[in-house]
């Protein structure tokens, strides 16, 4: 029977994955304070249900950068889905399409951009890191456009990869059979070796990521592609305003699932100031710690247009492959519809600050 919650899927995934892969997926940087705070922040809000509203039809559909979604939910970009399931990103793509959800494929996908696009039936975006090898980046952008990707998501919170102590202690390296197949193997070699005290991921990023990336470099990307540019990893109003000035189409409020700056703001806590700093035509997405449909409702009530979900998708893959991702996305969708019905807010636009109160005795900053 079940799973009935994402926590059920998490338990099953943990039982199935090798412990060093589990640690890579689950872990955060440093003391994992931000990782924990992402989850805890949702508990700072209480919901204010309205009654005697016709909720016989709850509509979770929306338009995001010109693409229709059935749910305000996307799969966050994550490296190496094949760590969790043999089919990897193609399974994720099929499941996301069935759920009417967005898929953000990662630059370190373990299936080719073209394989992912062929499996996808819904909108697809591609996440990029700013690699020193700008030629490799330019080639990816060209391939993404040709394959039908609809936006580029530049991750801006990782000039280097944060120190993840679980991976360092485990000497984690990406297993040889699993590769970031969209990049030249020569660029990826360090990911497959662990140096003393550093994971392969950390060594690879030190070698290949260009930490000199700054606002003026965004023009390079925008010149190479007509695709909308999304910045992932914004946590402040200052950066939100700069993003708007630089012609960005959307932003993702994120601390990278607590994997980058330990001690950074929980993403839900940063969301209101980012929303307030941007005009309504620039949608704000948020990720980090979304585990239930009511979490989705809270994020939307604080001004997010949609949420991205990271680890739970890998749990789904590990627990049941493509069907496991169906379960994860299906549970979130069902829980969101239930929350909307019981809140008396049958349309996404009804989810506003009026839906929230601070949890009694806790300063939530509903504003
Ligand atoms: C195993 C794993 C790999 C990730 N790889 C990437 C990546 O390659 N690029 C990126 O921008 N974010 C990456 N992320 C961060 C996610 O996109 C997302 O910000 C985060 O997982 C959201 O938090 P959640 O896992 O609590 O939902 C990764 C996260 C995990 C757990
Ligand atoms: O972005 C990440 O969190 C991550 O785990 C990763 C994976 C491969 C290369 C760089 C970062």
Image (cartoon, rainbow, N blue to C red):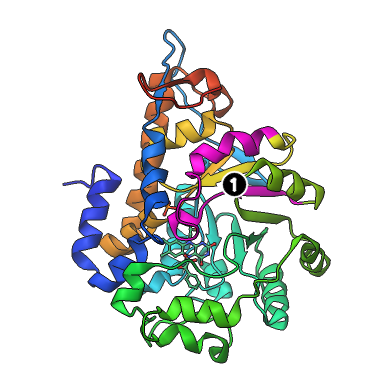
Residue 220: percent from the left, percent from the top? 80, 69
Q: Nearer the viewer, residue 355 or 207?
A: 207
What residue range appears in magenta? Answer: 248-276
Q: Nearer the viewer, residue 37 or 83?
A: 37
Q: Which residue appears at 35% of the width and 72% of the height? A: 167
Q: Nearer the viewer, residue 128 or 195?
A: 195
Above or below residue 220? Residue 96 is above
Q: How many marks?
A: 1
Q: Circle 1 is placed at which residue position?
A: 235
Indicate the secondary structure of the residue bearing disc 1: loop
Q: Which residue appears at 38% of the width and 56% of the height? A: 311
Above or below residue 299? Residue 68 is below
Q: Which quadrant would the C terminus be assigned to in this image? A: top right
Residue 265 counted in the magenta span:
yes
Q: Residue furthest top?
A: 52
Above or below residue 182? Residue 70 is above
Q: Residue furthest bottom?
A: 186
Left or right of residue 272, residue 135 in this image: right
* Quadrant in which residue 85 is drawn: bottom left
Left or right of residue 76, residue 6 in this image: left
Left or right of residue 128, residue 99 in this image: left
Residue 63 counted in the magenta span:
no
Question: Crowding near pointer 1: few (<14 within 10 Å), some, many (20+)?
Answer: many
Residue 236: percent from the left, percent from the top? 63, 44
Left or right of residue 61, residue 337 in this image: left
Residue 345: percent from the left, percent from the top? 49, 20
Residue 75: percent from the left, percent from the top? 48, 54
Q: Nearer the viewer, residue 197 or 135?
A: 197
Residue 323 in view here: no
């Amino acid at each position: 029977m079940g799973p009935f919650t994402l926590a059920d899927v998490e338990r099953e995934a943990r039982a199935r994955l090798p412990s060093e892969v589990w640690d890579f997926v689950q872990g955060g940087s440093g003391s994992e304070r931000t990782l924990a705070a992402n989850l805890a922040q949702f508990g700072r809000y209480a919901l204010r249900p309205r009654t005697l509203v016709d909720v016989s039809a709850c509509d979770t559909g929306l338009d995001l950068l010109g693409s229709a979604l059935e749910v305000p939910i996307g799969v966050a970009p994550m490296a190496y889905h094949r760590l969790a399931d043999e089919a990897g990103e193609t399974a994720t793509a099929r499941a996301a399409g069935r759920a009417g959800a967005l898929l953000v494929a990662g630059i370190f996908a373990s299936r080719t951009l073209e394989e992912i696009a062929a499996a996808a039936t819904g909108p697809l975006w591609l996440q990029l890191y700013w690699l020193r090898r700008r030629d490799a980046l330019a080639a990816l952008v060209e391939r993404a456009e040709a394959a039908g990707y609809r936006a580029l998501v530049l991750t801006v919170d990782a000039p280097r990869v944060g120190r993840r102590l679980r991976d360092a202690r485990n000497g984690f390296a990406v297993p040889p059979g699993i590769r970031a197949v969209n990049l030249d193997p020569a660029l990826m070699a360090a990911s497959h070796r662990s140096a003393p005290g550093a994971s392969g991921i950390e060594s690879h990023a030190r070698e290949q990521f260009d930490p000199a990336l700054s606002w003026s470099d965004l023009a390079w990307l925008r010149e190479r592609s007509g695709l909308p540019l999304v910045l992932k990893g914004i946590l402040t109003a200052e950066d939100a305003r700069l993003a708007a000035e630089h012609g960005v189409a959307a932003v993702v409020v994120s601390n990278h699932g607590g994997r980058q700056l330990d001690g950074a703001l929980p993403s839900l806590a940063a969301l209101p100031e980012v929303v307030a700093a941007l005009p309504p035509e620039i949608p704000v997405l948020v990720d980090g710690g979304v585990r239930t449909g009511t979490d989705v409702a809270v994020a939307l009530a604080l001004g997010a247009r949609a949420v991205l979900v990271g680890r739970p998708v890998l749990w789904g893959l590990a627990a049941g492959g493509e069907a496991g991702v169906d379960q994860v996305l299906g549970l979130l969708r069902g829980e969101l519809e239930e929350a909307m019905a019981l809140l008396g807010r049958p349309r996404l636009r009804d989810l506003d600050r009026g839906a929230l109160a601070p949890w009694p005795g806790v300063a939530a900053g509903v504003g």
